[in-house]
Image (cartoon, grey):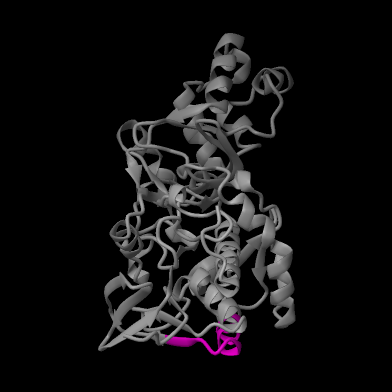
Amino acid sequence: MAPTHDVIVLGAGAAGLFCAGLAGQRGKRVALLDHADAPGKKILISGGGRCNFTNLHTAPDRYLSENPHFARSALSRYTPADFIALVERYGIAWHEKTLGQLFCDGSAKQIVAMLLEECRAGKVDLRCGEPVGAVEHGDGLFRVAFGAETVVAPALVIATGGPSIPKMGATGFAYELARKFGLKVVQPRPALVPLTLSGEDILFRELSGVSADVVARSGKAAFREAALFTHRGLSGPAILQVSSYWRPGESVSIDFLPDQPQDWLLAAKRERPRSAMARVLGAALPERLAGRLAESVGVAGELGQTQDKLLRVAEAKLRRWEFTPSGSEGFAKAEVTAGGISTAGLSSRTMEAKAVPGLYAIGEAVDVTGWLGGYNFQWAWASAHAAANALAEGDQGAV
């Protein structure tokens, strides 16, 4: 069967749309296929509908992978400044919210419209709303059954993401395909996901809706952002961040007093000896949380009536409040998937499979997972750019 296209891209999400548009504009005949009824669905819900499209502080050390150096090449060759230039070329207004996170002033729809326009400029053959059937490879060609048709090309790009947010149509299809072609898969797990509590810790359920600025830690990873108590456990940016590093059975610790100097409670005892612990904590934390923590550390009376030793113990606990999550809210609530197609079988320069010429994997499908705040979008753009350049140049077999 003769080729119908030069490149088949599976998955019309951030990475797939960007890769298809770039390759098409470089003269490749690209077929972009997706089982969903419309492209860019996860982009549309990202960032509260405003799309946190990149992060100014992008660096390789803000990504998790079994090979922590893998992302370096692609990220260095397509930077946040490059994507910002594209966004500005389309007249899309944006702002920095916090910690380098960039959002559209308007809507995430603007980013999807921009990517679709890039695809139109590249004459990309975009097809949605049909199931992807058998994917075969032989005689240097990939054959993909899509609906009633078979699409044929010498190159295939896996850009179908991971199983996070299945209600948006997400599946583990990328991993099935990778294994079919002999690529290893690092065990996928939910990342950037709320953590659940049980046992004594579930007593915090009564604080559902309360948030506080904290430092959350899991292993060597520490993040200073808001933590949010929920009816099932803990969420908020600080918790979502550490969830990517957390493993079942491990503990997580929270510093509820990140802005207070050491021996803060002893100083408060000297300055306000008649104040109760809950009132003192209330100066640094939401009132409901302050009251609950005061109960938990067992200091009920006035500070002036409490031994210094007990106050030191209480402060130490408030600075390193340890709990062991019972689990997470899973792929249904995970913003991204950690793990995925092993980078050991891919070129860091081209994203091409070393053992299967013409096969590429990009975006969330790959074992590269960024921090919360636009890092995963930047990986999508950078990995798509690397693959598109390789496709356009016929650059194969690079290490």
Determine the image quadrant of residue 80: bottom right
Residue 154, picture quadrant: bottom left
Q: Does 125 appear in magenta?
A: yes
Q: Is residue 269 left or right of residue 381?
A: right
Task: In this rendered view, identify the residue nearer to me: 369 or 146.
Answer: 146
Q: Position of residue 79 (x, y in %)?
A: 69, 61
Tell whether 56 sits left or right of 60.
Answer: right
Q: Residue at x 60, y 61 (%)?
A: 378
Q: Which residues are magenta?
A: 113-126
Residue at the spot x=36%, y=86% of the render? 2
Where's the N terminus, which quadrant?
A: bottom left
**Residue at (31, 37) in percent of width and height:** 198
Find residue 262 and report its horizontal and vertical position in percent.
Answer: 69, 21
Is residue 383 visible in the rendered image? The answer is: yes
Q: Is residue 231 visible?
A: no
Res. 395 image quadrant? bottom right
Residue nearest the observer in this picture, 223 or 351: 351
Question: Horizontal and vertical percent for residue 379?
Answer: 57, 59
Q: Is residue 268 above or below residue 279?
A: above
Above/below status of 247 relative to 166:
above
- At a point 51% along the width and 86% down the height, the residue shown is 124
On the image, the x and y values in percent for residue 50 come to 59, 72
